[in-house]
Every structure is written in structure tokens, then in C-alpha cells.
Image (cartoon, helix red, strand yellow):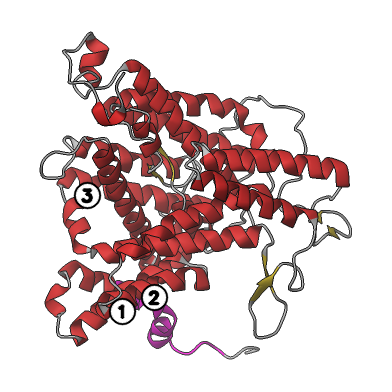
Amino acid sequence: MTTLDARPSPRPPANGLDRYFKISERGSSVQREVRGGLATFFTMAYIVVLNPLIIGTAEDVDGRILGIPQVAAATCLVAAGMTILMGVVGRYPFAIATGLGLNAFVTFSIASEMSWADAMGLVVLEGIVITVLVLTGFRVAVFNAIPVQLKTAISVGIGLFIALIGLVDAGFVRRTDAGPVPVQLGQAGELSGWPTLVFVFGLLLTAVLVARRTRGAILLGIVITTVVAIVVEAVFKVGASFTPGDPPTVNPDGWQLNLPQVPSDVVSAPDLSLLGDFSLFGGFARVGVVAALLLVFTLMLADFFDTMGTVVGVGAEADLLDADGRLPGVERVLLVDSLAAMAGGAASASSNTTYIESAAGVGEGARTGLASLVTGGLFLLALFFTPLVTVVPFEAASPALVIVGFLLITQVKNIDFDDYTIAIPAFLTIVIMPFTYSITNGIGAGFVSYVLLKVTAGRGRDVHPLLWVVAVLFLIYFGIDPIQEALVGDPAPAGT
């Protein structure tokens, strides 16, 4: 018997499938690839539940809601198609799905300023831009322009932001009506109601599973907590937090979003009505050219660096990197990843990206794109079970957001806090994201402060020319209102 650390020597290819995916050449087997593909799917399948709860429940600026079943179907379809494409074209065990953090940015920072169609149009544009960067070879140049530790700070800030969203959605943290404290613990400063207790149970359960390195820990946490929620609702008849009517019924201690009840249907034909529902340039008319370009840039930045880190990290774990730390044929991987961003926007599923959870498949022995075919096939199968997501209340899904936030925050140890010219920009990036409920604001604050501190410290040569341009764009972004006022004139007094 062999272990993953003592893999057998490469063997001559047994057939065409083996030769195409280089299964024997990379010391793997069909069985390992299948097992790895299964592990990757069950580790990242939580996105089928979480993405609809984030994107499918939020109103855009016009009050439109995309809907949970529609987003769930789009999420499965794009993940299936792009993961299979990654397997066939990229030939590496990387899986693709809607990016957590990216979907939160699209929901809370973009759709809050324009329609969903306009927001998804910007996602498509981001995919087009990043594809051009791949085809021209410029993507590596852009990657090298951003300091590594500032990239780390962006991930950490997104982690805090996601965790805060989870705590708020579950009602564990709530807004206050008045007073100096903007948020508080639960209702009136204390936890109350069965749903909150279910959230606490789910958070502790998921934390234990993750700490024990249980495969599929996040998905298991969602499923088990949902079952507990169904039992609690059946026994105690808690009810929903809001029931429409005349007048509507408000129950502060009720379930957020979905009422956990067994659905009448488990299998159904997917609702693919969101496919193609995007406006490529509608966002420019809604928020202006500068603001729209900055939103596209922010999407591109997050997608860009998440993918690079994932490819290098998973590739290293699988011993697929060359002597220079590069992944052979990485251009194919980056091309599929860029196309996935476009596909996600075109389907209203948000930008799709390569998942770090692919490491779970690598841990099971996957080394080739055949594992991605297995993972993609399972996402395709999940397309017909989307009614199950309407059972999951926020209290059951939000623990996953908090734990994923934790996983992102662990990267903070890679920031050098002894160098204030990087530590302060990193700090501002991290804290401004959750405190202003905006990923864009955090990234902008980090870039502007980084350039300023480097220059004032006499280290202006450390700043890449591209960062000067980005910092100026963010200054315009932050000062857009006074700039418009200066160009157009003072707004007319109210009542005139």
C-alpha cells in the first residue's frame, strides 16, 4: 500500500484517457481522481446554499429580488460547466464556483446602487477585462504591482466582512434604534428565541467539525443545523420573523429569511430564467463612469489575486509546481478562470473563481483534470435538487459565513506589523471593510494610505507606477460628491 506522501513512480499511460489527463505521469489513478473529485464537491457544495441566500434574497436599488431557486439553479449550472471546462482545458484538479466575498461585494456594494442586471453586467465586464489580461500576458505584471501583504489584508478584510454579515443575518448581532452603540448583542442587548439558539448550536458544531479537519465540515454544519431547525420549528412553532399581510406580522424572535419546513418537492426542473439577464453598460448610467470603473476594478482585483493564490497553494500541495514554483500550463487555468467570471455574471450567479477547497480533492489523491470532471458532474446533478435550499434559514447557513470568515482571517499572520508603511494600510483595509459594510472602501483606503505612507517615508520608489494610478482613482471615488459639487455648483436649497 502507498500513501499520498509516498506516491508510486510515474507509469506509462494505459489508454487515451490516461494520456490526455496525464494520470499515470502524475502518479495518480482513476480511483484517486474520482475520490478526489467527490471530496472537493462535498467540501465546497455549501456554495449552492450560501450563494442563493446572499444574492437571491437582497433587493437591488429598484427593489427587485432575484429569488433563491433561480440563483441556486444558476449557481449549480455555472459551477458545473466551468469546473468541467477546467478539467478538460486546464487539466488540473481545480474546481470553480461563485466566489464567497465576491458575491457579498456584488450584493452589498454594487446591487445596492443599481439594478441586478446592471450589477451583473459589471461582473461580465470584469471577466472580459481579466480575460484580456490573460491573453496579453499582462495579468502577471498587474499581480506583481500589488504588494503581497496588501493582497493578504484584502482577504482578511473580506473575512471580517463576511463574518459580520453572518452574525447580523442570524440576528446574533443587531442594529440599534438610537444611542451611541451602532450594534448590539441580539434583541435589546441579549440573546432570545429558538432561532438564535439554533445559530449558536450551528456555529459551535461547524467550528468543531472544522477544527477536527472533517471533510465537508461546512456543508455538514449547514445540513445538521437545518435538520435541528426543522425539528425546533415543528415542536415549538416559532414562525417567521416577518409575515406579509395587512398589517404585516413582525416577530423579532422568528426565523430569518426561510421557515425551516420539509418541502413538498425535493426534485424539480431548474429555473434558469436568470440566464442572460444582464446589462453590460447599464451600471455606467446608474453610478457614473468613474464609480463603475472602480467597481469593475475592485471585482477584478479580488478575483485576480484569489485565483493566483489558490493555484499556487493547491499546486504546491499536489507537488505540481516546477523548480521555479510555477505551474506548467498555468495560462490555460487562468483563461478558464477568467471565462468563469464572465459566465457567472451572464447567469446572475456572480463572478465564479477557482476554489481553495480544491485542496480537499488533492488531499484525497487528485492530481489531474479528471477529478474536476467528477466535481462538475456532481454540480450538474445538484441542479435538480435546488428546492432543498428554500428550507435553510439564515440561522442555519450563517455559521458557515462566520467560519469562512475565520479561515480568511488566518492569513493576517503573514502581514509584517513592524513596518508601519504596510501595517497601517493593511489595518485600514481590514477594519474599514466591515465597519463601512463595503469592500470597495476598504481596498481604496488601503491603496491610498499605502502610497501616501511610502512617499512620506522617503520610500516612493517602492510604489509601482500602477499603484499611483489606482490611488488617484480611489481618491476620485472617495471625493466624487465634492468634485461633482465643484464642477456643477452647489445644489439648490431644499424647497426652491
What separation in Å lies between label 2 and label 1 (alpha carbons)?
Answer: 8 Å
Question: Which corner quadrant holds the N terminus?
Answer: top left
Disc 3, disc 1: CB below 8 Å? Answer: no
Disc 2, disc 1: CB below 8 Å? Answer: yes
Say which residue appears at 18% left-offset and 59% top-offset: 144
For the stretch drawn in magenta, the main secondary structure is helix
Label 1 residue SS: helix
Q: Is residue 365 a member of the stretch shown in magenta?
A: no
User: From this viewpoint, is residue 202 visible?
Assistant: yes
> Disc 2 vs disc 1: which is toward the camera?
2
> Which residue was labeled with disc 2?
428
Question: Which corner quadrant holds the C terminus?
Answer: bottom right
Judged left or right of residue 156, residue 165 is right
Residue placed farthest to the top in the image?
A: 15
Closer to the N terminus: mark 2 or mark 3?
3
Q: Tell me where residue 288 appears, x and y as whole percent.
A: 41, 67
Q: Out of 308 and 292, give the one closest to the viewer.
A: 308
Q: Which region is colored magenta?
A: 473-492
Judged left or right of residue 435, residue 244 is right
Amino acid type at mark 1: Ser
The vertical placement of 377 against 141, above or below, is above
Q: Tell me where residue 292 appears, x and y as whole percent.
A: 39, 63
The vertical placement of 135 against 285, above or below, is above
Q: Quadrant of residue 387?
A: top right
Q: Out of 62 and 385, give the one closest to the viewer.
A: 385
> Which residue was labeled with disc 3?
133
User: From this viewpoint, is residue 55 visible?
Assistant: no
